[in-house]
Image (cartoon, rainbow, N blue to C red):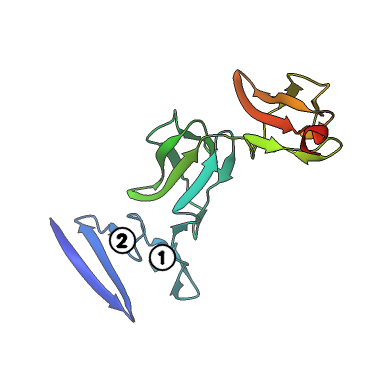
């Protein structure tokens, strides 16, 4: 024997599948199917429903190598995380998303039959400058937005040097290429130091 019981309590709408054994399976407040032990909803507190379950971000933009923490708010239930494109953005069992390469991926948090999604857009890693002109004695700092180790070097230290933090110092007239290496990838900036004598 099987029938549907509909119950109205205030502004809250409940449905319950009632079996011949008298087991009530509720679908209230948008929560997954559950039991009301002792007549009480596990999602209710002091007679009112709990906070609406939601994901803390529905979209995020990251550069390669960066990470963002996703969370499900309003419940303490177990969450299963997944990515539709792990080569673009991966997610661990705690909702930490790591950007892998340029593209888009959708991260899904699943609680029972309910799903909550976040669109991740991954941008290519790039130097803050690819060309710069500096007078001798002047300096500028190049930046690369990554948590990974960066190795800096100059093609001609006599014209422009660079330190471990990406600070470039112009030495004398000429051109030099500053290279930032991250793993197997290289990012370059051409530094031009003008000849003051030629301009005078």
Which type of secondary structure does the marked residue at label 2 adopt?
Answer: strand
Residue that carries the numbered disc 2 in the rendered image: 26
Q: Is residue 173 above or below residue 70?
A: above
Q: Residue furthest bottom?
A: 10
Quadrant placement of the C terminus: top right
Q: Residue at x 35, y 66 (%)?
A: 29
- What number is the disc on residue 157? none
Badge 1 or badge 2: first in the primary sequence: 2
Along the viewing direction, whichever of 147 and 42 lies nearer the viewer? 147
**Within 10 angstroms of label 1, few (less than 14), some, or many (20 or more) residues?**
some
Question: Does 120 appear above or below 19?
Answer: above
Q: Quadrant of residue 6?
A: bottom left
Which residue in the protein does label 1 denote?
41
Query: Could you say which is closer to the camera, residue 77 or residue 3?
Result: 77
Whether tag 1 and tag 2 are in contact, CB under 8 A, the answer is yes
Image spot of residue 185 (x, y percent)? 59, 21
Report the number of numbered marks. Answer: 2
Separation of marks 1 and 2 at Cα, in angstroms:
9 Å
Say if residue 95 shows up in the picture: no
Secondary structure of the residue carrying tag 1 is: loop
Task: Check the image and name the residue furthest to the front.
Answer: 200
Which residue sits at x=75%, y=25%?
A: 174
In the picture, the quarter occupied by the N terminus is: bottom left
- Residue 5 picture quarter: bottom left
Q: Position of residue 152 (x, y in %)?
A: 74, 25
Rendered location of residue 138, percent (x, y)? 83, 40
């Amino acid at each position: 024997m099987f029938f549907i019981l509909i119950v109205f309590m205030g502004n809250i709408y409940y449905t319950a599948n009632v079996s011949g054994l008298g087991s009530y399976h509720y679908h209230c407040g948008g929560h997954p199917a559950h039991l009301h032990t002792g007549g009480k909803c596990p999602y209710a507190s002091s007679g009112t429903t709990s906070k609406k379950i939601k994901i803390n971000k529905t979209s995020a933009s990251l550069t390669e190598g960066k990470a963002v923490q996703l969370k499900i708010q309003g419940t303490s239930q177990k969450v299963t995380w997944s990515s539709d494109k792990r080569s673009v953005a991966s997610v661990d069992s705690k909702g930490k998303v790591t950007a892998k390469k340029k593209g888009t991926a959708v991260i899904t948090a699943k609680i029972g039959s309910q799903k909550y999604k976040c669109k991740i857009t991954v941008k290519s890693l790039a130097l803050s400058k690819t060309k710069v002109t500096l007078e001798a004695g002047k300096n500028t700092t190049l930046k690369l937005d990554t948590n990974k180790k960066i190795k800096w070097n100059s093609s001609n230290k006599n014209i422009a040097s660079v330190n471990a933090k990406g600070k470039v110092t112009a030495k004398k007239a000429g051109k030099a290429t500053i290279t930032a290496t991250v793993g197997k990838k290289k990012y370059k900036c051409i530094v031009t130091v003008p000849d003051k004598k030629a301009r005078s």
